[in-house]
Amino acid sequence: MAKFNRREAREKRHARLRQQIVGTPERPRLNVYRSLHHIHAQIIDDSIGNTLVSASSVEPELRAKLGSTGNQAAAREIGLVLAERAKEKGITKVVFDRGGYIYHGRIAALADGAREGGLEF
């Protein structure tokens, strides 16, 4: 009998979601990855397979500003930074890809921060 593996279950959910969520040049995909200590977000155009904008709690300037990187406040700040960088590139509308994670806690905080920063999804 196989043991339950959270990572594999999340990857299955993400694969199922990705069948429906696709980033286009007009409306790229905002992808989120959450680890125990950090959160990463990137805006991707799936038609060409390029990352257009990214933000992460691993970046030295953000890490110094945040203090703790694995909480909701840090996730919200990453969302704000991502939205600011996206606006510089002319991106205002995105499709939200929660990466198989539950829309709660840090994932919701990142989405709220991105919305506050001006992204529509």
Image (cartoon, rainbow, N blue to C red):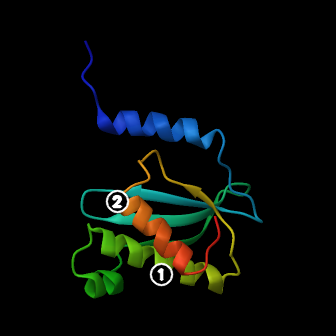
Q: Which residue is mark 2?
A: 105
Q: Which residue is mark 1?
A: 81
Left or right, 112 with reference to 53: left
Left or right, 109 with reference to 84: left
Left or right, 64 with reference to 44: left
Q: Residue at the location (74% across, 58% down)?
A: 24
Left or right, 103 with reference to 52: left
Label 1 to label 2, Cα distance in Å? 18 Å
Name the secondary structure under disc 2: loop
Residue 95 at x, y = what percent?
Answer: 64, 59
**Mark 1: amino acid:** Val
**Mark 2: amino acid:** Gly
Q: Is residue 57 visible?
A: no
Residue 40 at x, y = what percent?
Answer: 41, 65
Residue 120 at x, y = what percent?
Answer: 65, 70
Between 23 and 96, the one lying in front of the other is 96
Between 92 and 37, the one lying in front of the other is 92
Between 9 and 58, the one lying in front of the other is 9
> In terms of image quadrants, where is residue 61?
bottom left
Q: Residue at the location (49% across, 53% down)?
A: 98
Q: Residue at the location (66% across, 56% down)?
A: 49
> In terms of image quadrants, where is residue 26?
bottom right
Can you say whether 43 is above or below 87 in the image?
above
* Quadrant housing the C terminus: bottom right
- Structural crowding at the residue carrying mark 1, measured as other residues with C-alpha within 10 Å and reported as few (<14), some (14–19) or many (≥20): many
